[in-house]
Image: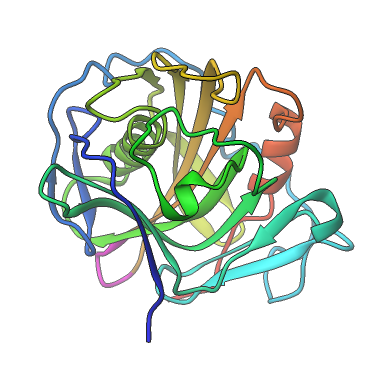
């Protein structure tokens, strides 16, 4: 039986792009300005990566490996001692619309520094999204709509919008143009969303955040995404170098 943890935040979609996610159905987005993108993308076809980017063993000693058979991604996060926790592969993290329907969903996820103070800038967040983590990573997608470039931007923008305010407290978002991502058996695209949080009810809520996505297409035409969203501007936030190191471990499980 699947375990589902829903974060009911009542949001609209984030960017004026089409997106595909088999868990949410149609994803034609309302325009919130996020598509006006100039933020730089972290990661490209020139990104450095450790050797042998395949298999179910971590690429860095002591790290934890997470696998999504559904979305055909495998990646690593730092050890438990560094405050990282991997969730059951089928545990779903989601944000919903005003009708309670999920519009962004991720599985095969992991959290960084879970259990701190209530850090969600959206007061309606519950479940995994409301446990005070400073970063979350996971996989999404499964549809055939749009291009890989559009979906890379869509996933980055939508998760930034959902996780850092939603429709009630719209964050300001700039999404980069998608850039090629060729490593770990993936021939896809990556995009970055820079988020400025507009609702800060407490010092736990970050002033800004960053979201990175990696999109790949399988032979059957379905598109799948890997996403990390991370608080910025708060103590113990992930650095750009730490995020890039995690991204360097992302690889395909094959089709």
Pick the front one: 38 or 67: 67
Magenta-drawn stretch contains 26:
no
Pick the front one: 55 or 31: 31
In this rendering, would 59 be left or right of 122?
right
Colour scheme: rainbow
229 in relation to 192, above or below: below
Quarter of the image that includes the N terminus: bottom left
Residue 208: percent from left, percent from top: 52, 18
Pick the front one: 10 or 51: 10
Residue 77: percent from left, percent from top: 71, 55
Name the residue at 35% across, 19% down. 171
217 in relation to 90, above or below: above
Whether residue 182 is visible: yes
Kindly report the secondary structure that dominates the magenta region of the rendered protein: loop
Name the residue at 51% across, 73% down. 89
Quarter of the image that includes the C terminus: bottom left
217 in relation to 147, above or below: below
Give the residues in magenta: 219-223
Residue 169: percent from left, percent from top: 30, 21
Quarter of the figure with residue 168: top left
């Amino acid at each position: 039986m699947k375990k589902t943890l829903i974060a009911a935040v009542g949001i609209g979609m984030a960017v004026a792009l089409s997106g595909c996610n088999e868990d949410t159905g149609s994803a034609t987005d309302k325009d919130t300005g996020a598509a006006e993108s100039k933020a730089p993308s972290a990661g490209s076809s020139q990104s450095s990566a450790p050797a042998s980017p395949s298999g179910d063993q971590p690429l860095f000693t002591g790290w934890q490996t997470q696998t999504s058979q559904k979305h055909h991604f495998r990646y690593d996060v730092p050890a438990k001692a560094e405050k990282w926790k991997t969730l059951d592969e089928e545990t779903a993290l989601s944000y919903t619309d005003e009708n309670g329907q999920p519009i962004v969903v991720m599985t095969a996820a992991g959290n960084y520094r879970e259990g701190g103070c209530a850090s969600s800038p959206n007061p309606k967040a519950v479940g995994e999204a409301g446990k005070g983590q400073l970063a979350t990573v996971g996989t999404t997608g499964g549809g055939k709509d749009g291009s890989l470039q559009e979906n890379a931007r869509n996933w980055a923008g939508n998760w930034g919008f959902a996780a850092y305010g939603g429709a009630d407290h719209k964050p300001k978002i700039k999404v980069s143009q998608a850039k090629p991502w060729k490593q770990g058996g993936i021939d896809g695209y990556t995009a970055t969303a820079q988020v400025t949080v507009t609702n800060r009810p407490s010092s736990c809520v970050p002033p800004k955040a960053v979201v990175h996505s990696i999109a790949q297409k399988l032979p059957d035409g379905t598109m799948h995404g890997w996403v990390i969203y991370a608080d910025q501007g708060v103590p113990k936030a992930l650095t750009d170098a730490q995020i890039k190191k995690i991204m360097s471990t992302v690889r395909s499980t094959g089709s």
